[in-house]
Amino acid sequence: MPKPRVVYWFRTDLRLHDSPALQAALDLKPECLYPIWTWDPHYVYRARVGPNRWQFLLDCQNDLSNAITKLNSKSKLFLIREAPQTLFPKLLKAWKITHLVFEKDTDAYARERDESVMEIAKEVGVEVIVKMGRTLYDPDELVKHNHNKPTMSISQVQNAGSKIGDIARPIPAPKSLPNPGDTKLDFEQEKPVADPDFNAKQREGKEGTYNKLSGPKGDFAVPTISELGLKKATTPHRGGETIALEMLDEIMANEDYTATFEKPKTAPTAFEPQATTLLSPHLHFGSLSCREFYWRVQDIVTAYKGKASQPPTSLTGQLLFRDMYFGAQASLGYSFAQTYNNSHCRFIPWHLPSKVDTTSSLITGSYLVDDSKAEEYFIRWREGRTGFPWIDALMRQLKAEGWIHHLGRHAVACFLTRGGCYVDWERGAEVFEEWLLDHETACNVGNWQWLSCTAFFTQFYRCYSPIAFPQKWDKEGAFVKRYVPELEKFSAKYIYEPWKAPIADQRGWGCMIKGDGSPGSTNGGKGKVYPKPMFDFPTQREICLRGMKNAYSIRLYGNDPKVLDGSWRKLFDDNAEGPTEGNDGLPGAMVDHEDATGEEENHEVPPSPKAQKKGGKEGSKKGHKRDATQGTLDGMVTRKRQK
DNA sequence: CGATTTGTTGGAGCA
DNA sequence: TTGCTCCAACAAATC
């Protein structure tokens, strides 16, 4: 029997330490091993990925490629610029591959992709080996041991986990790697269809992801930001396994911190240094193994003389939440990431609801502007000019650095949804998806559902105040002053509500509180301005609470027939909060296939709020392409059957 | 079964 | 400064 020729396909496991799948590849004792990456058009065009996360990904790839070369000077991470669905049929033949090995991925799209790749491999007689490695427990196993239901609470995860058994100890990094074989590519490159391109706005140069199979120099190198045409990153946080392991070492060196960590007690206002580990982006890209993290912490906790913290607030508890969200997503699939058709997400008639493609039941990536005020609130929230310094500082930090503290995420998420703007959580989740370095669909979606009280959490009367909450840690407002420098001279008394500062003080502190923070609102060239608050918070909080109480009493979930067909409106008063008016509008914000508007920027503000949906359709745009956020790649990659 | 407790991370007022 | 109750009140888990 000939020796195996193996392709190891890296995805969200960009590391050498503790990779069960890589270990399985090496256990084959292959004649040659090709470590590869393929550019998935779902990531390039359909996921929302800002410059900071692109940079972090390229960092991870560079670091991994260098680490591979250190183990074998003939090897590296081979980046091949084509969609896996079209590349593999050709590549597996060209390189005479016998085995394809990769880490299991239970994200909704990834499952579909991997299914089709496995089918391809079968057709060309290549054996596929898949190993779980991304989470503490295999999400499918968690679900199985949770009575085949999505894991919706930490206790469910703990119960299911205890039935699965012990969490595996990490596997050491390999000490050597086999040579790759001949890397000739004697086939044509097939380019995916770039349209629609959700990431067009992330680019300033020419998009060159798919210019040549082996890259511009033909050496399979990690692409540069300029090759991909991307804007420059602004984050100080960098990727790669080397950095991740250094960070882990540094954190573990502080045994008190590691053993007594309690998430709710860490300060979201800390910035030098941050109060939490900042390892989440590494967990996302796999530059740090969650089992490595788990056992390093657990061993310190076991040996700790004092009183150690416990899950769920402890460091290991944080990993259990991650597993919980993966378990929920693994069970619910595409519907997990949206309200529509989601059996476990409560239906609330938020403003700015997602449009839904009637043929797929998936949200399209664009939304209905049912209310011009809500649209203004959303845009000001996104741009960090709400007039609430705590919220604005967080949103500016998020955009610039790609990371904010977990409690800061709570504050801005509550503010956008149930505790302020009454805007659909899906709007906020999309912004986080674009800007977060650590964006993980399962965790992001789960946390937005949590904070909006649509799943996982229900106590909507527990509402974060943008004024009182940050004072728990930062009375002086040092955090605000760091990210909203306009206010750097403001006294502690007014730092969280600067609109209350006397005009004379505002003048003395060199910043007037006026306008809405848009580029046009200045002080006529005389000093700085910071916007007035966009609403009275106590009033808005009351409106939201009333809306939530009402929606909760109606008790609809995303898969209720009344939600699916639009008759939910009959259950809400015409003057209830949200797009509730009338009894015969379109179902939710459902749109016909052809009516899906492509671009996020397409939202014309309606002349009068609530008027728009009366007519229903906004004019037919025949032949418009489909643009599902979480959707499949229909029409993007065409799989050619091999003879 | 109904009652009680618990749930990672609220706020205001008070001792 | 910390810890307590109440606010107006959800729902799953547990007793």
Image (cartoon, coloured by chain):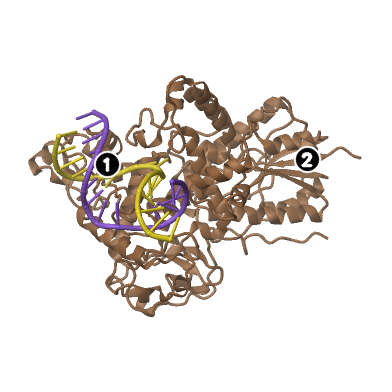
Chain colours: A brown, B yellow, C purple
Label 2 belongs to which residue?
A6
Q: Which quadrant is the N terminus of chain A positioned in?
A: top right
Could you tell me if the residues under marks 1 and 2 are in contact, i.e. CB atoms within 8 Å?
A: no
Q: Residue furthest right?
A: A1
Label 1 belongs to which residue?
A469
Chain letter behind tag 1 = A
Is residue C6 toward the left or the right of residue A174 in the image? Answer: left
Is residue A476 toward the left or the right of residue A63 in the image? Answer: left
Give the x, y percent position of residue A86.
71, 55
Q: Which label's residue is closer to the chain start, 1 or 2?
A: 2
Q: Secondary structure at mark 1?
A: helix
Which quadrant would residue A306 be assigned to in this image?
top left
Chain letter behind tag 2 = A
A149, A414: nearer the viewer: A149
Compared with A586, A502 (above or below) is above
Compared with A427, A264 (above or below) is above
Whether labels 1 and 2 belong to a single chain: the reply is: yes
In three-dimensional space, the C-alpha distance between marks 1 and 2, rounded to whole angstroms, equals 54 Å
Compared with A330, A586 (above or below) is below
Residue A479 shows in the view: yes
Amino acid bearing label 2: Val
Q: Where residue A111 is drawn, which disc sits there?
A: none
Give the x, y percent position of residue A172.
66, 27
Give the x, y percent position of residue A382.
35, 51
Compared with A262, A609 (above or below) is below
